[in-house]
Image (cartoon, rainbow, N blue to C red):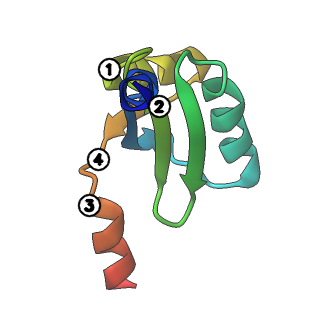
Amino acid sequence: MLLTATVALAKDIRTLLVTTQPQMHCESCENRIKGNLRFERGVKKIETNIPQQCVTITYDAEKTTPEKLIESFTRFGYTATELPADSTRQQQQQH
């Protein structure tokens, strides 16, 4: 019985990695992105990385989709493009 309850409560948490246009260049850019994305339905965590020009969004896949998250960037003046999940590892190895 406990196993059934645990499975029913499990969420489908996923990660989306994007880059933005215009590019982030300062803390103000990071704050603008984080401040706007935190209100999007299903968003659990937002991490920005200026040197690698990426935003990592952890979200509940039962409440939103990557397409909706990417579209939400346009509401605050950015265009987001999805990156392959392993692209940050490749960039870290090059530095």
Q: CA distance from mark 2 to mark 4?
A: 16 Å
Disc on the earlier residue, 2 or 4: 2
Q: Residues within 10 Å of mark 3 (few under 14, many from 20)?
A: few
Report the residue marked by disc 3: 86
**Foreground residue among 4 and 29:** 4
- Residue 67 position in % (x across, y down): 32, 20
In this rendering, the answer to whether 32 lies above or below 36 is below
Q: Which amino acid type is marked by label 2?
A: Tyr
- Residue 64 position in % (x across, y down): 41, 17
Secondary structure found at label 4: loop
Secondary structure found at label 2: strand
Q: Which amino acid type is marked by label 4?
A: Leu
**Foreground residue among 92 and 27:** 92
In this rendering, the answer to whether 88 lies above or below 73 is below
Q: Which amino acid type is marked by label 1?
A: Glu
Residues at circles 1 and 2 in contact by the CB criterion of under 8 Å = no
Q: Quadrant of residue 92?
A: bottom left
Residue at 47% of width from left, 47% of height from top? 56
Q: Residues within 10 Å of mark 1 (few under 14, many from 20)?
A: few
Report the residue marked by disc 2: 59
Report the residue marked by disc 4: 83
Report the residue marked by disc 1: 67
Disc on the earlier residue, 1 or 3: 1
